[in-house]
Image (cartoon, rainbow, N blue to C red):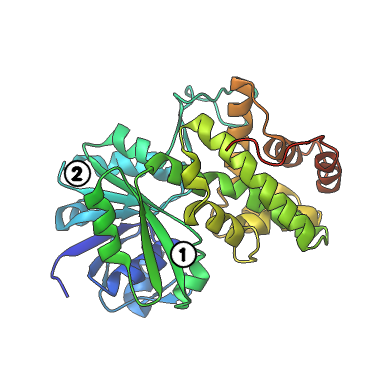
Amino acid sequence: MSDKKVGVIGAGSFGTVVANLLAQNVKVKLYARSDEKIANMRVNRENAGYQLHENIEVCDNLQEVASECETLFPVVPSSGFRKMMRDLAPFLHPYHTMIHGTKGLDVSLPKGMSIDDPEAYFTRENVKTMSEVIRDESVVVRIGCLAGPNLAREIGNNQPAATVVASSFDSVIKEGQNLLRSEYFQVYGNKDLIGIELTGVLKNIIALASGALSGLGFGENARAMLISRGLVEMIYLGRELGGNLQAFIGLAGVGDLVATSSSKYSRNFTVGYRLAQGERLPDIIASMNEVAEGVNTIKIVKKFAEHYGFRAPITETLYKVLMGNMTVKDALTYLMKIPLNVDIDFI
């Protein structure tokens, strides 16, 4: 094993699983902010329900992580990603490599305005992927992302899985593959960084809708219809945001969409399921230990589509559900009545 160290920033469930994957091949510094979480990891060698690999060292200092690790894996919620980058940026250099694992969007709005503000606007200039945030806030050049059917629970239990490392740099893809690949974990490469990021973001919308279907008691025919039509909507949205078709029909697109639209371990699926069971969105969010990125993604993408004047019927309908203007059952009835005569028209 090499003496080099790799840093993981963010000790949620997926960050912990990524750290354990890396630790099979290299020494890892795992950064966390919470004093309570750090103390527990140091004493019990456990976090988020997973035992920490012996090659993981817990850390509470960003400067220490950046100075000792040339390759960094940020895995933090999108809502805190830009602040994390601003805190980390003074310690970064052009020789660093960053491969993030965050499936969300960043929105820059005027001070005092939130994404729920009726006056909030969403254009390609103020809606950014995490790689664009890294580029905005730091001098790092070699940037990549992780995306794919990567349910933390299954990977943490050493069940077979795979991911995609995307980057415009072949060296970043190769680095990610060498660091992450194991007997149970396959790693593919893709040059369309923005497209692969967007697949991981947009599938959260469909996963939430799929959970709602299950919550209403509908079966696999309905889910198959939703997933297939959802993929079409993802491709249209992805193109508007700067991605390519190929990203959406591979492992990070179809693969991730199928996994998160069918699993009780998916946070977004869980939100949709509980909404259909009659729970209120604020109560659901308050009860969850980690962020379901799909909620904010629906709000952002709905207004983005509205600004540019194109239709995204699944996203628009889910937005009404989240805002309390439509029940889940009424949303499904509405979507079933939309007249669509063409199955595929983007190839």
Query: Looking at the picture, how far across and down is residue 89, in whole percent?
Result: 24, 40
Q: Secondary structure at mark 1?
A: helix
Q: Which residue is mark 1?
A: 13
**Quadrant containing the C terminus in the rendered view:** top right
Q: Is residue 142 above or below residue 59?
A: above
Q: Which residue is at 58% across, 52% downward? A: 292
Residue at x 57% of width, y 39% of height:
235
Could you tell me which residue is drawn at 51 percent across and 61 percent down?
149
Question: Which corner quadrant of the image does residue 58 belong to?
Answer: bottom left
- Total marks shown come to 2
- The location of residue 37, given as percent across then percent down, is 40, 66
Please indicate whether residue 212 sits to the left or right of residue 151 in the image: right
Which mark is first along the chain, 2 or 1? 1
**98 lies left or right of 274:** left
User: Which residue is found at the position 40% from the left and 61% from the top?
Assistant: 15
Label 2 packing within 10 angstroms: few (<14), some (14-19), many (20+): some
Q: Determine whether 260 is above or below 209 in the image.
A: below
**Residue extending farthest front:** 347
Q: Position of residue 344 (x, y in %)?
A: 66, 40
Query: In the image shown, does 95 or 159 lie closer to the viewer?
Result: 159
Q: What amino acid is labelled 2 in the image?
A: Leu
Position of residue 120 relative to residue 197, above or below, is above
User: In the rendered image, which residue does mark 2 sit on?
Assistant: 92
Foreground: 141 or 171?
171
Left or right of 328, for residue 61: left
Kindly identify the amino acid type of the residue bearing the numbered disc 1: Ser
Quadrant for the N terminus in the image: bottom left
In contact (CB < 8 Å): disc 1 and disc 2: no
